[in-house]
Image (spheres, grey):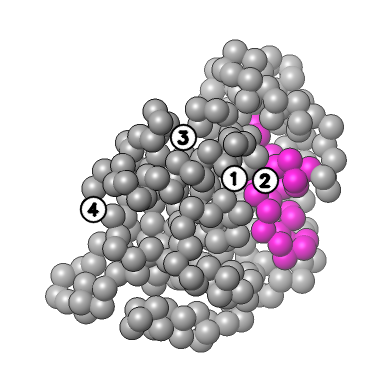
Amino acid sequence: MTINELAIDRGKRALETGALPGARPARFVFVAISGAHLYGFPSADSDIDLRGCHVLPPDEMLGLTDPEETYESTGGLIDGIEVDCVSHDIRKYLLLLTRKNGYVLEQIFSPLIVYDGGHLDELRALARGAMTRHVVHHYKGFFRTQEKLVLKDAQPTAKALLYLFRVAMTGLHLLRTGEVEANILKLNENFKLPFIADLVARKMSGKEKGRLQPEEFSGFLDHARVLEAQLDPAAESSTLPESVQNFSALNEFLLRLRRG
């Protein structure tokens, strides 16, 4: 098995065996793997980040008390590998989708599916209609947050820089093509940055090889900033619409799942 195939198998077993601490939702819509496995640079011992959405029962949504819309479980273990899970109720999840949330898009289009309750294909079609050029704000914000973290680190790592490149490349690819791709190696088939494969190899080799010297870190950071500077122009020329085109269809989907 590849690292990702093992991660999918472990994720399935985590859901099926109750390895995740806490009471899990009774009805998941789908669960996918995010994080390093999705981004294309997992190590053999990388945590498994499960992300998705679920449907709360109508009684929980209609009662006097506020519903707990987010399920979060950390500290689960499968084969000694840590597994965590974050899932939102379908209403909250669809609202995030309409609010230029790149994380949600990346989860919906993740190829690493752990569970599909039968609605994922429809959800993906709806997500395509909900994409707008304003998703650029998500990717710019993520880049700047990650950049601040990298600059604070006394010993920057290949992993930290890969997160910078990955988010800029995913944002640019989405704005230019309308396609969601989060794997940095697949993205680099188009961007053709000569150092990406080496950074991935260094990250996957371990902490010692993954550390960067100050002079090489500075050069890589300059390259990443060049990509980030292209996000606004890409948004301006993008064929993605200004606003969500299928809000009514999203609402109908929500009501059907809630009633079902």
- Looking at the image, residue 150 lies above or below residue 247: above
Q: CA distance from mark 2 to mark 1?
A: 6 Å
The chief SS type of the magenta part is helix
Q: Amino acid at mark 2?
A: Asn
Q: Secondary structure at mark 3?
A: loop
Q: Amino acid at mark 3?
A: Asp
> Which residue appears at 68% of the width and 14% of the height?
213
Q: Residue lying farthest left? A: 64
> Which residue appears at 55% of the width and 61% of the height?
108
Q: Would you say residue 180 sits in the magenta stretch?
A: yes
Q: Amino acid at mark 4?
A: Ala
> Which residue appears at 80% of the width and 66% of the height?
237
Residue 22 appears at what percent x and percent y? 24, 48
- 122 relative to 74 in the view: left or right: right
The quadrant of the image that shows the N terminus is top right
- Looking at the image, residue 259 lies above or below residue 209: below
Residue 214 appears at what percent x and percent y? 68, 16
Name the foreground residue: 116 vs 109: 116
Give the mark nearest the N terminus, 3 or 2.
3
Label 3 sits on residue: 47
- Looking at the image, residue 235 lies above or below residue 129: above
Give the mark nearest the N terminus, 1 or 3.
1
Q: Which mark is residue 183?
A: 2
Q: CA distance from mark 4 to mark 2?
A: 32 Å
What crowding class fits label 4: few (fewer than 14 Cα within 10 Å), some (14-19), or many (20 or more)?
few
Label 4 sits on residue: 23
Q: Which mark is residue 38?
A: 1
Region in magenta: 161-188
Q: Are marks 2 and 1 in contact (CB under 8 Å)?
A: yes
Q: CA distance from mark 1 to mark 4?
A: 26 Å
